[in-house]
Amino acid sequence: MGHFFLVTVSGPDRPGIVQQVTEVLVAHGANLEESRMTRLGGEFAAIMRVSLADAPTGALDRGLQGLASGALHVTTRPATSPAPSLEGHVIYEISLAGADHQGIVHAVADILTGEGINIDRLDTDVTNAPETGSPLFSMEAVVQAPSSLSLRGLEEKLADIAQRFGVDLAVRPA
């Protein structure tokens, strides 16, 4: 069984960051198991779950820290093996769109937490409306809900957010 590590990389976006990071991983015999990499504004951010067979981790850590000289911020820490799927849970997709208001994500997360719902993925974005230039917010989430909470039940729990913030909200099975 391999050892798992969580690696985060962030810094000013430019071509070649993914190549540099994966070059270090390959050079140290590490395998990229899962990752999320994106550009946020002018910044690059990545979070990666990496496995390493039996080799000591010090060399990999040093190799990754060597990237810091190129204006990247890199952290590593031990991670657990793959998370077990939540037995008896149903996967739903949640979409939300409308005028941007501070606190929308917190309001959604607060309800999800209260219902014992785990967030697998959450993506947000703010763009400008074509004619007015007003900020428009969008959110896409994939969640695991207890099977005791129906689709309709989840929609009802989130309906207050749609009304309070004046946004469109949709929940559908994944």
Image (spheres, helix red, strand yellow):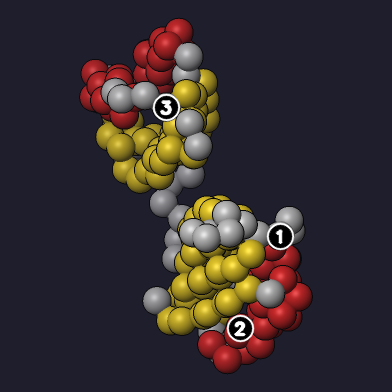
Task: Please state which amino acid type lies under the numbered disc 1.
Answer: His
Judge whether 94 appears above or below 29 on screen.
below
Q: In which quarter of the image is the C terminus?
A: bottom left
Residue 160 falls left or right of residue 43? right
**Marker disc for residue 101:** 1
Position above or below: 107 against 154:
above
Residue closest to the eye, 85 or 66:
66
Q: In this view, does 64 lie to the left or right of 151?
A: left
Residue at point 66% right, 87% down? 156
Amino acid at dot 2: Leu
Q: Which of marks 1 and 3 is nearer the N terminus?
A: 3
16 sits to left or right of 66: left
Mark 3 lies on a secondary structure that is loop
Can you tell which of label 1 and label 3 is closer to the viewer?
Answer: 1
Give the quarter of the figure containing the N terminus: top left
Q: Earlier in the sequence, mark 1 or mark 2?
A: 1
User: Quadrant location of residue 148?
Assistant: bottom right
Residue visible at 51% across and 21% down? 73
Task: Nearest to the eye among marks 2 and 3: give it.
Answer: 3
| Label 2 to label 3: alpha-carbon separation | 38 Å
Q: Mark 3 is on which residue type?
A: Asp
Q: Distance between the residues labelled 1 and 3?
A: 27 Å
- Numbered marks: total: 3
Q: Which of 152 and 102 is in front in this view?
A: 102
Element under label 2? helix
- Disc 2: which residue: 154
Rendered location of residue 25, percent (x, y) = 30, 25
For the point 39% across and 40% down, the residue is 37
**Mark 1 Cα within 10 Å, few/some/many (few <14, many 20+)?**
few
Q: Describe the element under mark 1 as helix, strand or loop.
A: loop
